[in-house]
Image (cartoon, rainbow, N blue to C red):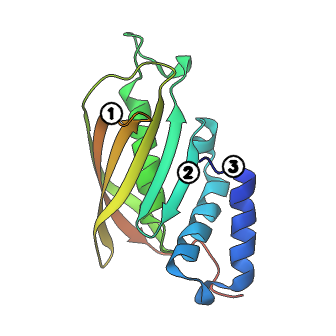
Amino acid sequence: MQISSLLWEEIFLMKMRKGVAAMTPQELAEASAAAMWNDDSASQRLGMALDRVAPGEAVLSMTITDQMTNGHGMCHGGYMFLLADSAFAFACNSYNQRVVAQACAISYLQPVERGTRLVAHAREISRRGRSGIYDVRVSTEAGDVVAEFRGQSRVIPGTHLSEEK
């Protein structure tokens, strides 16, 4: 299921009426994702969809277009990295803290043809203090794993949502 930008905006407004302090962890994750999505022109312009978010977890998807292919006619690895990195970003920013990547690595497991819809599922492995570790599995819609990504996160000052109601 893909959630449109308009729907993320509606989710954000609905959650903000409740106030940050009264939100459940799931509501906080959704409101934080909606706030980030509104300003994430890179992910949106590449045709990514934010399919699901939960505390410490996110699922994004993207279809590989002709413009995303390399000299071999396959998906350029940088686009798979971008998708995984975006899923990582939404997972580690799901607690209403501003979080950035400190380090990332990716292993490409098999080539991807144009027209393939990729799904990146990010999940939290560890979160302590200002640091976190997240794994992202990039698969085709059929479930074939095409890349594995690990990201290390670092909390920076600020929040996505105002603490005031």
Q: Residue at label 1?
A: 144
Report the amino acid beneath label 2. Asp
Q: Secondary structure at mark 1?
A: loop
Q: Is residue 85 left or right of residue 63?
A: left
Q: Nearer the viewer, residue 145 or 90?
A: 145
Of badges 1 and 2, nearer the viewer stands 1
Q: Which type of secondary structure does the marked residue at label 3 adopt?
A: loop
Residue 79, image x and y in percent? 44, 32
Task: Answer with the quarter of the image where residue 164 lies.
Answer: bottom right
- Of callouts 2 and 3, which one flags the residue occurring earlier in the amino acid sequence? 3
**Gap between marks 3 and 1, in whole Å?**
25 Å
Image-quadrant location for residue 101: bottom left
> Would you say the residues marked 1 and 2 are in contact, meaning their CB atoms lie under 8 Å apart?
no
Residue 122 point in image, percent of width and height: 38, 54
Q: Amino acid at mark 1?
A: Asp
Whole-Å distance between the Cαs marked 2 and 3?
9 Å
Query: Is residue 135 left or right of 90 when viewed as pictured?
Result: left
Residue under label 3: 4
Looking at the rendered structure, the secondary structure element under dot 2 is strand
Q: Is residue 153 above or below residue 13?
A: above
Give the residue displayed 47% in from the left and 25% down from the top: 116
User: Could you classify mark 2 by the number of other residues whose Cα lies within 10 Å: few (under 14), some (14-19), or many (20 or more)?
Assistant: some
Q: Which residue is mark 2?
A: 51
Q: Which quadrant is the C terminus positioned in?
A: bottom right
Could you say which quadrant of the image residue 30 lies in?
bottom right
Q: Amino acid at mark 3?
A: Ser
Q: Residues within 10 Å of mark 3 (few under 14, many from 20)?
A: few
Q: CA distance from mark 1 to mark 2?
A: 18 Å
Relative to 117, say whether 103 is above or below. Answer: below
Q: Nearer the viewer, residue 61 or 43?
A: 61
